[in-house]
Amino acid sequence: MDTTALWMRHGTCLDGLRRPTAHARPNSPLTGAGADEAELTARELRKRNCRPAIIASSPLRRARQTATLVAATLSAHLIEPMSAFAEWQAPHCVLGRIPDEYPPDYVTWRQQRAQNPDSSLPGGESLQTFAERARDVATIVRELTINNGPVLIVSHRLLIGAVAALHAGYGDGKAPHLVAALVHKIGTV
């Protein structure tokens, strides 16, 4: 059985177009350009004879829309979105805001997050919880590929980066190591 797992970031969403350095809001839809990106990527996958057995996605609107377009182009089976594949949950206080607009509490939290990975702000996900979720996602994806064959997951940059960090050997069994790798390598949480 082919246990290939491909990861794809969602297409450009409305928040990403209007305020590219802001934390996108969960319901931000794809733009026309984002839909074009999804279809172009799907056509390239088809051209390379890359045919996933199933396509899974984050439940966030932009990822669901991207997955739907890709599944249609590839004539692939789209399964129900999985909450585990969602983006890192930014605190409510920064959604839709650019760095110059971040409130002082968030700025302070960001400066101290690596020393206290269990901390979070209202509505947000701690780095510890995010690291544990990334580990769970790696297991979920492994099971999906074993049970179905090649899988395409449409998700978000930070989660894809976290799973890639795990695959590259960061986090050797301890979530704080993965958290430190995320803060150092990605830096934009």
Image (tube, rainbow, N blue to C red):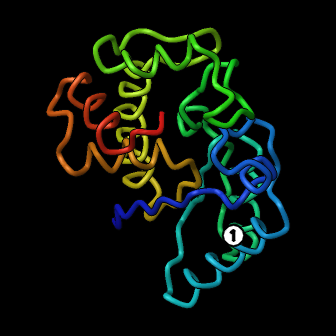
Residue 106 vs residue 83, the one in the foreground: 106
- Say what amino acid the circle numbered 1 marks: Ala
Q: Residues within 10 Å of mark 1 (few under 14, many from 20)?
A: many
Locate residue 59: give its quadrant.
top right
Task: Give the labeled residue for mark 1.
Answer: 38
Question: Horizontal and vertical percent for residue 157?
Answer: 51, 49
Question: Horizontal and vertical percent for residue 33?
Answer: 79, 70
- Asked which secondary structure carries label 1, the reply is helix
Q: Residue at x 57, y 60 (%)?
A: 54
Farthest residue, direction front:
100
Q: Residue at x 35, y 67 (%)?
A: 2
Question: Taking 171 as reference, is 57 above or below it?
Answer: below
Residue 171 vs residue 188, the one in the foreground: 188
Farthest residue, direction bottom:
47
Residue 71 as seen in the image, left or right of residue 51: right
Question: Taking 80 as reference, is 31 above or below it?
Answer: below
Question: Horizontal and vertical percent for residue 81?
Answer: 66, 42
How many marks are shown on the rendered structure?
1
Locate residue 111: give its quadrant.
top left
Residue 25 vs residue 169, the one in the foreground: 25
